Amino acid sequence: MTIKLEVWASRKLVILAAGIMVCGAYADGYRNPPPTAEGIGKSGANMVFADDASAVSYNPANLAFQTNASIVVDLTMARTENSYNNPFVPNADSKDSWVPLPNLYFSAPVGDKGIAFGFGITTPYGQGIEWNASEVYNPYSPISLYKAEIAMVDFNPTIAFKLGEKIGVGIGADIYYSELQFDALTGAVPPPVPPGPGSPPTGSAHAEGDDFGVGANVGITWQMTERQRTVFTYRSETELNYKGDLDVTPGSPFVSSSFGLKIKYPTILSAGYGIALTDTIRVEADVEWLNWSVNKTQTANLGANGSLAIPQNWDDTFTFAVGGDWRFAEGWTIRAGYAFIESPIPDSTISPILPDADRHALSLGLGYAVKGHSIDVAYTFSIYEDRSSTTSAYPGTYDIDSNLVGLTYSYSF
């Protein structure tokens, strides 16, 4: 019996820690979508021609080429529908709702020497997922995670300046504050050894924590000709060490204790090229490399319940995007874009708490501007590739659909 309890306790911690890597409802790990309707309308291909305060996020170097101050207010709404078909509960569906992702920017030139200041308050990572607890219950596991949420705010002060007439440089700080929580059903009786069906869950566990982190970002814009630009951007890796509490109910094999979890947000390297084909038509192509492999291992501290470093085996990824805009009438602009976004999560570690897959994003946007004011709306529909899990904790197949809507108001003065 001692051996059974030790094996069960070890498996219990492994399953809990392995499922804690909380999710993004938009895929791409737990990264959120582009922060404005202009970017959404071009499937994220907005580094080259971002021409208002939102350049703080897309490419801070572009602020050096702006001659007006601007304010940008954005509300993005994301919704993902997840289905999980597993050996125990066929066709489980997550409890999906629209998730609001607000973003706010301000920028202003300083004098007439190509120096500018910018500031953004954005939501670059986060979102969450929730399942009916009984639908993701695995009788071969003493722990069934059914809800996870992460929220993050990035305070991003930026300064930009020109090197000569053709090169702009932007430098910014990313000051993150983030909160994390998850909920799980927990069984009271250990399953037999070797693994077999366990007792239905009789207890529950709730964990939450928060932390601050600091990173940096840099952008460079080269105005090659009057109509062509090449850009490069860098955003640093940042580690957050979430700390908080783990609370359990009677019937749970856990005890209430402290809680800690380390999550690394990846280094991002980007490059883009854009050209104004005419006075009214612009197109650009961007590529990003994301160092998701920093999450090869997940470190979870469950206080009196123990701590573990659990392999996640995430992969580095590339994102490719092409987009353009056409000012087809006075004040009116239409946008379109396509992006291919790789998932960093291998089949061996995917779970219902973080369903993800490679996807193709198709976008449309429309904007109207008059006397310094502009309103933009955009929509993205994503086509996800088929996904199956080979992990013993959460075997099965996943079907994912998502919808993304952006609404942005900006004022240039």
Image (spheres, rainbow, N blue to C red):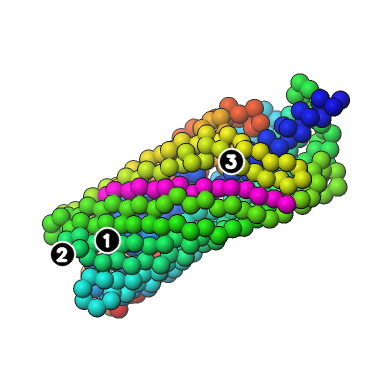
Residue lying farthest left?
Answer: 225
The Cα atoms of the two marked residues, 2 and 3, are separated by 46 Å
- Find out whether the residues at labels 1 and 3 contact each other: C-beta distance under 8 Å: no
Q: Where is residue 372 in the image (x, y as percent from the top left)?
A: 30, 76
User: Do the CB atoms of the residues marked 2 and 1 lie less than 8 Å apart?
Assistant: no
Which residue is denoted by mark 2 in the rendering? 165
Q: Which amino acid does label 3 sit on?
A: Gln
Q: What stretch is highlighted in magenta?
A: 258-272
* Gap between marks 2 and 1 measured at Cα: 11 Å
Place of residue 75 in the rendered image (x, y in percent of width and height, measured from the top left): 47, 64
Residue 312 at what x, y percent from top left?
A: 56, 36
Give the quarter of the figure containing the N terminus: top right
In this view, 371 is above or below 80:
below
Amino acid type assigned to the residue bearing label 2 in the image: Glu
Q: Quadrant of the C terminus?
A: bottom left
Q: Does the magenta stretch include residue 215?
A: no
- Nearer the observer, 349 or 259: 259
Q: What residue type is labelled 1?
A: Val
> Please, what is the dominant secondary structure of the magenta stretch?
strand
